Image: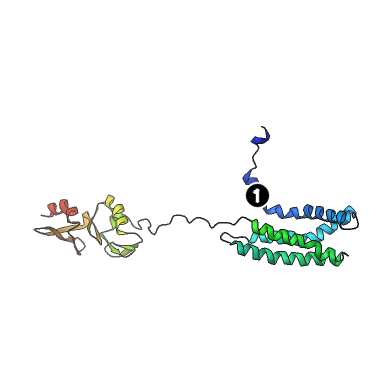
Amino acid sequence: MIFAKIRPDSALLANARPFAPLLFFPAGAAYCMLYDLTIGGGLIPLSELLSWSLFTLSPWVAGALIFERAVQPGDTRRALLLRALVLGTSAYLLSAGATLMLGGDGERAFFTRLPLLAAAMLLAAQYPLKALPAASPTTDEEALPVFPEQVIYASGAGNYVELHLGNRTAIWRQTMSGAEATLRKAGFVRIHRSYLVSRQAIRKVASNRKGPVEVALVSGQCLPVSARYASNLAPTAARSA
């Protein structure tokens, strides 16, 4: 029951993972001991075993560390296997060269390294792929770049809204619907699919028997009023009459 409650710490495992290739040293030493006992001429002295393990396994450890650092989110299984093949072959040749330099024969240098190359490819085939990070929600809209009371009227310009301030125009990356929702709180009214007007900036509303058709602004501009939004001007039109 006590052991059933023990759970590996995922954070600890994640922090320890980059050092996992160092396990090649004890695993390789154990492999060399097994080889000497079964195929070789018997166990070699411990000091010699450690020296062999250090020099001949260092290329494999280096290759595994490079592989671990090279894996990127979005890498395919094919890319991982190709990378493992290149690094594994390099480690195989370097390890074989170190063995020959230490006095080993060709069989020990090349034949005994093949299982390590096979193990490297097997590990790469089982290596967990890193998924691309989920795209964070983005929006093309941004905050109002000026104070609402500076704006006389706003006009749609594709994916942007032009804020007319009298002597200059500010560009706002926003939709007209979004602009309407924001500016309505500051006393703006939608008069057309492409226009929002500050009620304080309306000097006069021109109407016909069907309702408002145009607004004259204190800045001198005259803007059209569409039938769809004419009812929004009812209070203003009454004051202008």
Which residue is nearer to you in this view: 183 or 57? Answer: 57
Identity of the residue furthest to the top in this view? 1
Left or right position of 169 against 111: left
Q: Quadrant of the N terminus?
A: top right
Q: Residue 131 at what x, y percent from top left?
A: 55, 56
Tell me what residue is drawn at x 12 percent, y 52 percent.
Answer: 238
Can residue 65 be seen at all in this image of the molecule?
no
Please say if 239 is above or below 169: above
Q: Residue 195 at what x, y percent from top left?
A: 24, 61
Can residue 240 be seen at all in this image of the molecule?
yes
- Disc 1 marks a residue whose amino acid type is Asn
Left or right position of 42 against 166: right
Q: Secondary structure at mark 1?
A: helix
Left or right position of 220 against 159: left
Identity of the residue furthest to the front in this view? 38
Identity of the residue furthest to the left in this view? 209
Colouring style: rainbow
Which residue is labeled 1 in the image? 15
Q: Quadrant of residue 151?
A: bottom left
Q: Quadrant of the C terminus?
A: bottom left
Q: Residue 20 at what x, y percent from top left?
A: 70, 53
Tell me what residue is drawn at x 40 percent, y 57 percent.
Answer: 139
Q: Residues within 10 Å of mark 1 (few under 14, many from 20)?
A: few
Tell me what residue is drawn at x 32 percent, y 59 percent.
Answer: 175
Q: Residue 198 at what x, y percent from top left?
A: 24, 56
